[in-house]
Amino acid sequence: MNFEPNVRRGEWAWQPANRRYLEPKPPVTVLSPARCPDCEAVYYEGRWRWGAVPFAAHEVRCPACERQRRQLPAATLVMEGASVARHRDEFKRVALQREEALQRDNPLQRLMDIEPTPGGMRLTTTEVQLARDIGETLRERYGGRLDAEYDKQGMLRMRWSR
Ligand SMILES: [Zn+2]
């Protein structure tokens, strides 16, 4: 076996302490104030928000739109089990409600895709926080089991089964 250091970028994800460096945030150097041409979110004082576009804003695509364009979710949540397959509409509604709630303060909290699977459904999000929030809300309201782990690329993979 070869014990030479052979750490490629991305494999650091195995070390939980390094996780936060691996979340594949697009390397955006944001000029402030800025406005996203895709979703109209504005950036000033260090964060993205909804609101009036400041005068002379730079055009900079926000990280959420960048992820959507690249099809690069920050997190995925798989929901599975017989009751999930029977109640997809209800659980989808919960996901949409949580997105709306989190997005009021932060335009970057966004669902990317929600799709049915043979055993339930699956969704992806532009921020880790939204997937966690949806998973925890489902577990609180309906019980079941929630698992989460980061994969080698630094994407959060959650699974709720009920
Ligand atoms: Zn945007």
Image (cartoon, rainbow, N blue to C red):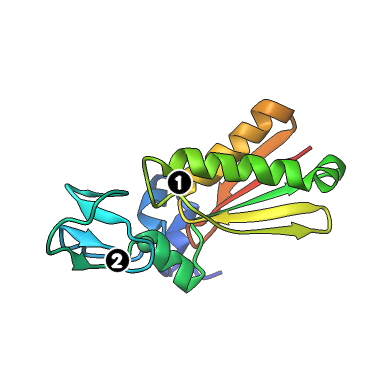
Inspect this view and state whether residue 5 appears.
no
> Contact (CB < 8 A) between labels 1 and 2?
no
User: Residue drawn 84% across and 40% down?
Assistant: 83
Judging from the image, what secondary structure is the residue with disc 2 in?
loop
Question: Residue drawn 21% across and 61% down?
Answer: 34
Q: Quadrant of the C terminus?
A: top right
Q: Looking at the image, is 63 positioned above or below residue 160?
A: below
* Cβ of mark 1 under 8 A from ligand 1: no
Q: Is residue 14 left or right of residue 106?
A: right
Q: Which mark is residue 142?
A: none
Q: Which residue is mark 2?
A: 27
Is disc 1 placed on a helix, strand or loop? helix
Relative to 69, say whether 120 is above or below: above
**Residue corresponding to mark 1:** 16
| The one of 61 and 52 positioned closer to us in this rendering | 52
Query: What residue is rendered at 74% in x and 53% in y?
Result: 121
Kind of residue indicated by mark 1: Pro
Dot 1, how many residues are within 10 Å of its Cα: few (below 14), some (14-19), or many (20+)?
Answer: few
Q: Is residue 108 visible?
A: yes
- Which label's residue is closer to the chain start, 1 or 2? 1
**Mark whose residue sits in front, 1 or 2:** 2
Position of residue 37 relative to residue 143, above or below, is below
**Quarter holding residue 111:** bottom right
**Residue 45: x, y in percent?**
16, 47
| Three-letter code, disc 2 | Pro
Q: Nearer the viewer, residue 137 or 151?
A: 137
Residue lying at the far left of the rendered structure: 56
